[in-house]
Amino acid sequence: MSQANQGAETHGFLGEEFLTWLWFKWETDGGEFTLSGGRIVGIALDDFLSFAALTEDETEQTLRRGLPTRTAEARTALRQGHRLRKARVLIAEGERQWTATIDAPTLSLSGVKLPDDAEECESEMDRTADRAANWLALHEIVQALYRLFLKERLHDDYQSTGAEKQANWMAL
């Protein structure tokens, strides 16, 4: 088993909690986060949610199109204790906007749409450099959001503060 697969097997639940936490923060706090260096990013969940099965005998549930976060099926999954396995997210920083599907156990990104090329890109080399910078920025943002989540999740009083608030939100 590769190291990445082994990490997903043993700690993948944290990625699932992370995606569910992003959804919670989006719905309860507006989805705006201040990252290190004062960078402000906004997130929203988009048109794809896949819920993890609670046991290996259960089926994963996938919701697509429209606003799946607003459906009765999504709310029922949350009430039953399901966490997100995959979610399509919108991430914005200033004028730049990315969309990507995040796979929770590995935090890998797929289906990525980068911001439009900068106007000052005149050559193919400029465009390539701009796209590479946008890929790196997206990766850094996701990692920074994950660090914020872990900071909250690993705090000593998490069970009586953040976890309780999120559980109440999930029960709505």
Image (cartoon, rainbow, N blue to C red):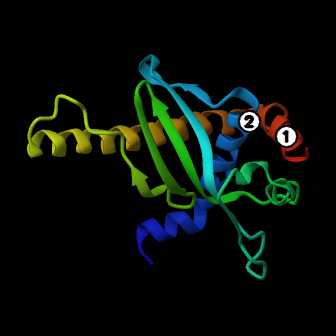
Total numbered labels: 2
- Look at label 2 and name its amino acid: Glu
* Residue displayed at 22% across by 30% down: 119
Please say if 53 is above or below 114. Answer: below
- In which quadrant of the rendered image does the C terminus lie? top right
> Viewed as shown, does residue 71 lie left or right of 60?
right
- Quote the CA–CA distance across marks 1 and 2: 9 Å
Residue 68 picture quarter: bottom right
* Residue displayed at 85% across by 37% down: 164
Residue bearing mark 1: 169
Please say if 47 is above or below 61. Answer: above
As drawn, which residue projects farthest toward the bottom?
Answer: 57
Of tags 1 and 2, the one toward the viewer is 2
Percent x, y of residue 25 = 69, 34
Residue bearing mark 2: 27
Percent x, y of residue 67 = 70, 50
Percent x, y of residue 107 = 50, 55
Percent x, y of residue 122 = 10, 35
Q: Residues within 10 Å of mark 2 (few under 14, many from 20)?
A: some
* Residue displayed at 44% across by 28% down: 93
The earlier-in-sequence mark between 1 and 2 is 2
